Image (cartoon, grey):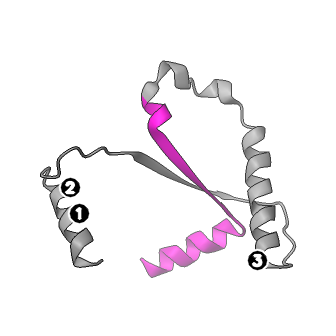
Amino acid sequence: MDKELDLVAEKILTNRLPNTKIELVSLVLYNETKPIKLISEDDIKSQIEKIIQDRYASFDKSKIRIDENPILNRITYIIFPIWKFEELAQEFQKLI
């Protein structure tokens, strides 16, 4: 990290950065089973975006009552579909 960002990070960690707003981020990785066609980088990105949209569209939003839990409105979800998730998890386990 460059020195300027290092100083900012240090101030955040020690509560010395004024007007700091903390945003919550949740990384969601899941095992994806829909196939993609390896055509071009743009096509692959488009296919992945469509898969995520399709999965999210079928999610039952009534299970999480965002209106009753305002903190949930402040969470940013970053979704990562993973093909062969089990293999990735095993490889990660070996590395740690």
Q: Secondary structure at mark 2?
A: helix
- Image: 36 above or below 30: below
The answer to whether marks 3 and 2 mark residues whose Cβ atoms lie closer than 8 Å is no
Query: Quadrant location of residue 39?
Result: bottom right
| Mark sitting earlier along the chain (3/1) | 1
Q: CA distance from mark 3 to mark 1?
A: 34 Å
Q: Is residue 81 left or right of residue 73?
A: right
Query: Quadrant location of residue 30?
Result: bottom right
- Image: 17 above or below 70: below
Residue 45, x across and y down, in percent: 74, 67
Query: Quadrant location of residue 70?
Result: top left
Q: Amino acid at mark 1?
A: Ala
Q: Is residue 62 magenta?
A: no
Residue 12, x across and y down, in percent: 20, 55
The answer to whether marks 1 and 2 mark residues whose Cβ atoms lie closer than 8 Å is yes
- Image: 39 above or below 82: below
Q: Quadrant of the N terminus?
A: bottom left
Q: CA distance from mark 3 to mark 2?
A: 37 Å
Name the residue rendered at 77%, 39% in the picture: 57
Badge number at residue 12 = 2
Residue 14, x across and y down, in percent: 13, 55
- Density class for disc 3 (Cα within 10 Å; few <14, some 14-19, many ≥20) is few
Residue bearing the label numbered 1: 9
* Numbered range of the magenta stretch: 71-96
Q: Is residue 2 left or right of residue 47?
A: left
Residue bearing the label numbered 3: 41
Name the residue rendered at 75%, 48% in the picture: 53
Q: Amino acid at mark 3?
A: Glu
